[in-house]
Image (spheres, helix red, strand yellow):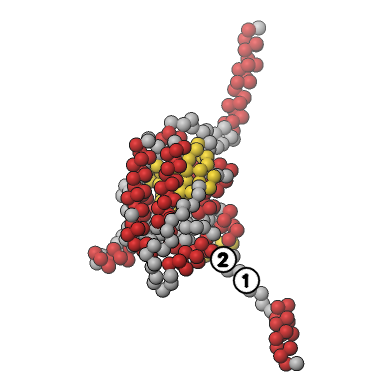
Amino acid sequence: MVNWITNYVRPRINSMFGRREVPENLWIKCPETGAMVFHTDLEENKWVIPSSGYHMKMPARARLADLFDNGTYEDLPQPKVAQDPLKFRDSKKYLDRLKENRAKTDQEDTILAGLGTLEGLKLVAVVQEFKFMGGSLGMAAGEAIIQAFQRALDEKCPLVIFPASGGARMQEGILSLMQMPRVTVMIEMMRDAGLPYVVVLTNPTTGGVSASYAMLGDLHIAEPGAEIGFAGRRVIEQTIREQLPDGFQTAEYLLEHGMVDMVVKRHDLPETLARLLKIMTGAPATAPHGLLEGPHASQAEAEPALAADEAPAQQA
């Protein structure tokens, strides 16, 4: 009798009247101001905190959908590479870490790439997912980037990359570092073909990624507040035994010191990229949205009609 009450009746009562668990991540806290934002509001605002303008990390698939016209694009296939060639193990097996991150992100590895159009201009876009092992560069990521470059060469179109990475993947050792020169060769092939290669630096872009393809673009755009550099601030301060200036390694600091070409807010990125890529490729420019809206539009439309009405009167 006691077991029946304990094991059945009490859990049933608790489930009916007890406190329900609230799912995590419903509310997102702004790292800058501490303001709380409902997750759907954040997603609708492209993962930018509305009150402060702080740019949160944007999921790779959402980034591709936001970039391409109507959110439609062709997914480029994920390459098959050797899994855990060094049989690496720290506190966990490398294979177990890969399984966990694949389940968490629903991706095979850190790179997603797609072929689509931006304001009618064909291009290939490559995005690194930071949630997948810190966006670290390994064999699978390197091969995916190389295949994306090859597709851009085949299609004779520009390539835009959105790096977000802590650097090379330590579990793959020298095999990871080898991806840096391999991708650099593809960048040279793009230049030889006269095709634009544009880098959009997102938060964070550090380590081996910043020492290779992230800083080899024809044009470097950065999102506001993005951390960009090789070593971290704390490591540099401990090495040189000096205090670094405020804002060191931020996108704005690098713009001021000539390391990036421009800092562009996330909402303005698609239009900015389209305009710049059309200039670089010689494609016809698209008129800015709202060019003939407002009071000037009605005046511009009225002038031809007015001229037509005046012509018969003058002849008479």
Is residue 190 positioned above or below 82 on the image?
Answer: above
Outermost residue to the top: 316
Instruction: Report whether 46 appears left or right of 218.
Output: right
- At 48% from the left and 40% from the top, the residue drawn is 123
What percent of the width, then of the height, locates residue 154? 44, 38
What percent of the width, then of the height, locates residue 301? 61, 26
Is residue 245 positioned above or below 74 on the image?
Answer: below
Which picture quadrant has residue 235?
bottom left
From the viewer's side, name the closer residue of 100 and 194: 100
Is residue 280 positioned above or below 181 on the image?
Answer: above
Amino acid at pointer 1: Val
- At 46% from the left and 57% from the top, the residue drawn is 110
In this figure, which residue is indicated by the disc labeled 2? 25
Given contact means CB atoms under 8 Å apart, are the residues at marks 2 and 1 in contact?
no
Amino acid at pointer 2: Asn
- At 41% from the left and 35% from the top, the residue drawn is 280
Instruction: Report whether 163 appears left or right of 63.
Output: left
What percent of the width, then of the height, locates residue 111? 46, 54
Give me the disc on residue 22: 1
What percent of the width, then of the height, locates residue 86? 37, 64
Tell me the distance, in whole angstroms, between the alpha carbons under discs 2 and 1.
9 Å
Q: Secondary structure at mark 2?
A: loop
From the viewer's side, name the closer residue of 154 and 125: 154
- At 46% from the left and 54% from the top, the residue drawn is 80
Q: Secondary structure at mark 1?
A: loop
Q: Is residue 40 visible?
A: yes
Callout 1: 10 Å neighbours few (<14), some, many (20+)?
A: few
